[in-house]
Image (cartoon, helix red, strand yellow):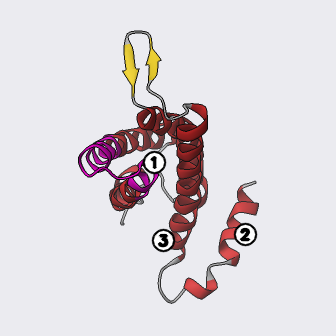
Amino acid sequence: MITIIENTIDFFYPPFSRVMNKLTFRYAACGASNTVLDILMFYISFHYIFSEQVQHFGPFAVKPYIAAFFLAFCVTFPIGFFLMRNIVFQGSPIKGRVQLFRYFVTVLICIILNYICLKIFIEQFHLFPTVAKIMTTAIVMFFSYTSQRFFTFKVSSI
């Protein structure tokens, strides 16, 4: 499976080789694929699973866009870790469980950024939830790449 994914991504790399190195291209390809899946999951769950209605979990009421965000997260978190660890940052000497913990911490920060941005874009700027999600994703992407490259899957610079 890993070889198939690598070969597929690397097949499309040559036209981009002048603009970015292979690691950055693999990150962009894996991240973009997982991001598209995330946005699709968000859209489907917001509109069809949660029917744009407030969700009640015991005494808690959760707005539909937050419920959709968390459902999409439950799908894309393990897929994202698998892709980053096995396709993008293969040279990291950090043990898998440490990578998973660091990835989880990074993702938690991304969740907080997502939550804050969604709240601001939807409730303050009155944007459509899917548009707000796309804008939020662009903001979080920069933080995610930097933290994964230099923290989660850091390769020693000896």
Q: Which amino acid does label 1 sit on?
A: Ile
Q: Which amino acid does label 2 sit on?
A: Asn
Please state the extent of the stretch shown in magenta in the rendering. 112-134
Residue receiving disc 1: 94
Decide: is 13 above or below 115.
Answer: below
Q: Nearer the viewer, mark 1 or mark 2?
A: 2
Tell me where residue 2 appears, x and y as whole percent.
71, 56
Q: Which residue is drawn at 42% across and 39% down?
A: 104
| Mark 3–mark 1 distance (CA, rounded to whole Å) | 19 Å
Tell me where residue 20 appears, x and y as whole percent.
47, 81
Q: Which quadrant would residue 98 be assigned to in this image?
A: top left
Secondary structure at numbered mark 2: helix
Q: Which amino acid does label 3 sit on?
A: Thr
Left or right: residue 82 compared with residue 109: right
| Mark 3–mark 2 distance (CA, rounded to whole Å) | 15 Å
Instruction: Indicate yes or no whether the magenta region holds residue 120.
Output: yes
| Mark 1–mark 2 distance (CA, rounded to whole Å) | 24 Å
Residue 7 — which label? 2
Tell me where residue 137 appears, x and y as whole percent.
41, 56
Secondary structure at numbered mark 1: loop
Is residue 88 shown to the viewer in this render?
no
- Closer to the chain start, of discs 3 and 2, is 2
Which of the two residues, 26 or 118, is positioned nearer the viewer here?
A: 118
Residue 131 — which label? none
Q: Which residue is drawn at 58% across and 50% down?
A: 40
Left or right: residue 107 compared with residue 26: left
Which part of the image, by quadrant, shows the C terminus?
bottom left
Which of the two residues, 33 or 94, is positioned nearer the viewer here?
A: 33
- Closer to the chain start, of discs 3 and 1, is 3
Residue receiving disc 3: 24
Tell me where residue 85 appears, x and y as whole percent.
55, 52
